[in-house]
Image (spheres, grey):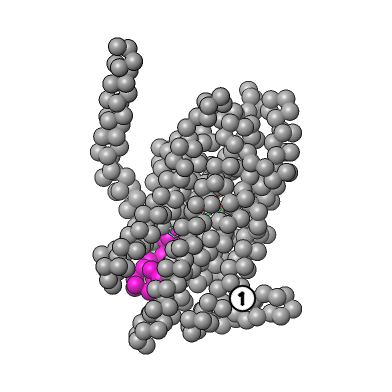
Amino acid sequence: MYTQAIDLPGQPAEPSRSGPLGLAPPGAQARFDATVAAQGKIEPQDWMPEGYRRTLIRQISQHAHSEVVGMLPEGNWVTRAPSLKRKAILLAKIQDEGGHGLYLYAAAETLGASREELVDALHSGKAKYSSIFNYPTPTWADIGTIGWLVDGAAIMNQVPLCRCSYGPYARAMIRVCKEESFHQRQGFEIVLTLCRGTPEQKAMAQAALNRWWWPVLMMFGPSDTESVHSAQSTAWGIKRIGNDELRQKFIDATVPQIELLGLEMPDPELHWNAARGHYDHGPIDWSEFKRVLDGDGPCNRERVAARVAAHDNGAWVREAALAHAARKAARQAEKQAA
Ligand code: BYC
């Protein structure tokens, strides 16, 4: 997975870009359209429209940033998880999220973006990451709820991305979804344990569900009528299912889980609509979503500051790795010359 950015034998070293003035080589656009229409895969060495490339860099890098920033709310609980076993499981989950970030940065690099520019965009506030990671985790129940609902919503959104038209992204999603599935189950198990525990523990689970429910619904993005990218991304085979349909699928799958846990519904307007064959829900407060995207959520500043500090504190590791790689290359060159 990490080697996706390495050149393929017999293929051009660089992903083929539009010609001068952004013109496609003869037949390239038709080949691209035919591949997308046939649900085939576009690979890094294939010609692709500049807008397709930019859209993928935007989405994949935002997705990578989300995975990496998403480690922070959970990292907050590694030392406080209630048992050694819970600590070990949480640590492994957080490491998985870091791994997802790496696959995704590698996938974005196959499109000609450099890791430095992507990371700089996150640190300067230019690039977005998922709104959900700007909320705090005040109790252990929040950790269970993140696994159950946040990873649950992530799977709902990412399973269709396994069929995305861009090969490296689609392939990264297959492994990511398998791991998210495990995360979702471990989160549900934490919440189930709390719900079967003392009244105080069950109340903690209820409070976490109430806090996370609406932000989780916002994870799927704005309503289709407000979504600026959906139409084009769907035409390019990047998006397979719209934001509203995925949100509805998530709600329909989650309500029975809330019932099984014996928790109260976090939205008094949630009810089964037999005519539609779906659950209806109350209105989502999109002004809150907008505030969080504009950098004014409960933890936006803290999250970006933590990432910048981690990057700065890790400068020596990057320098050491580069020095090691340079020495190894020099030794190899010496050997070849001898
Ligand atoms: N948060 O036209 P739209 C995880 C932005 S990590 C922030 O619908 P699109 C996990 C959107 O970017 C899960 N911004 O856009 C990790 C656009 O703004 P720009 C992360 C959002 O791209 C650790 C504008 O709103 N998952 O699971 O067609 C621990 C208009 O939206 C959000 C992914 O990244 C949001 N929630 O559709 C546990 C999945 N929603 O870019 C778990 C990959 C929308 O024009 N991404 N925006 O400035 C996608 O599937 C799509 O990008 C989205 C949005 C469905 C999110």
The foreground one among 282 and 220 is 220
Question: Label 1 crowding class (10 Å Cα cut-off): few <14, some 14-19, many 20+?
Answer: some
Q: Quadrant of the C terminus?
A: top left
Question: As shown in the figure, which amino acid type bears the numbered disc 1?
Answer: His
210 magenta-colored: no
List x then y, in percent, for residue 295.
44, 56
Query: Residue, x 60% and y 76% (percent of image)?
Result: 282
Question: Which range of residues does the magenta coloring cover?
Answer: 133-144
Name above or below for residue 68 compared with residue 53.
Answer: below
Name above or below for residue 56 compared with residue 177.
Answer: above
Question: For residue 319, what is the image quadrant?
Answer: top left
Query: Residue, x 48% and y 35% (percent of image)?
Result: 5
User: Residue 148 vs residue 245: left or right?
Assistant: left
User: Residue 14 vs residue 305: left or right?
Assistant: right
List x then y, in percent, for residue 140.
34, 72
| Residue on which the image places disc 1 | 281
Query: Residue, x 51% and y 36% (percent of image)?
Result: 110
Question: For residue 199, what is the image quadrant?
Answer: bottom left
Query: Residue, x 40% and y 37% (percent of image)?
Result: 116
Q: Is residue 12 visible?
A: no
